[in-house]
Image (spheres, rainbow, N blue to C red):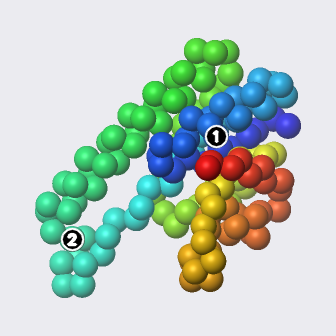
Amino acid sequence: MKNILVTIDFNKNEKVLIEKAFQLANAFDSKLWLLHITAPEPGFVGYGVGPQHVRDWRATEIRKEHKLLEKYTNSIIKKGINAEGLLIEGATIETVIEETKKLNVDLIIVGHHKYNFIYKAIIESVSSGIIKKSKIPVLLVPLE
């Protein structure tokens, strides 16, 4: 197992995921890829790419996400693990699957949140979507 990809959503539970990913990367001498998919630029009908205040807000959010991803990546590197952080804009499930192919990933680590029946009936979770579309093993880490 040479490449492990861990998806991070910055919902205050990412440290649990990063720790599990670190343990596996350390045990298998793997490279660890920390991946955060940021929301696509909102499109507003009649406004092109959106009003300036929305673009400014998005730019600020992306900078915060980038700094936090960089902090986590550097802390892993300091512990002696080869790691790289990726911040990509796009649709979450599809982007994760695309990146696993590009990076020759051997294992995907994703967090799993418990949802009620109504949520599950209406919205598919990211972890479920990745499991359905992935051709490589997926490790679910409970976050509750």
Measured in 3D between alpha carbons, the distance from the residue under mark 2 to the one under mark 1, in whole angstroms, is 34 Å
Q: Would you say residue 79 is visible in this rendering?
A: yes
Q: Which of 103 and 135 is in front in this view?
A: 135
Check the picture and name the quadrant holding the N terminus. Answer: top right
Q: Which residue lies furthest to the left in this view?
A: 52
Place residue 99 in its image quadrant. bottom right
Q: Taking 121 as reference, is 9 left or right?
A: left
Query: Would you call the spot at circle 1 few (<14 residues within 10 Å), some (14-19), or many (20 or more)?
Result: many
Q: Would you say residue 102 is visible in this rendering?
A: no
Residue 87 on image: x %, y %: 48, 46
Q: Nearer the viewer, residue 39 or 21?
A: 21
| Residue at image point 70% right, 67% down | 128
Relative vertical location of residue 28 with respect to residue 144 in this rendering, above or below: above
| Residue at image point 61% right, 57% down | 113
Relative vertical location of residue 22 with respect to residue 77 in this rendering, above or below: below
| Residue at image point 40% right, 39% down | 66
Residue 127 on image: x %, y %: 67, 61
Mark 1 lies on residue: 17
- Numbered marks: total: 2
| Residue at image point 20% right, 63% down | 54
Q: Label 1 amino acid?
A: Leu
Query: Would you call the spot at circle 2 few (<14 residues within 10 Å), some (14-19), or many (20 or more)?
Result: some
Secondary structure state at the residue bearing disc 2 = loop
Mark 2 lies on residue: 50
Q: Tell which tag, 2 or 1, sits nearer the viewer.
A: 1
Residue 30 on image: x %, y %: 77, 30
Q: Taking 62 as reference, is 14 left or right?
A: right
Place residue 21 in its image quadrant. top right
Q: Label 2 amino acid?
A: Gly
Q: Do the residues labelled 2 and 1 touch (CB within 8 Å)?
A: no
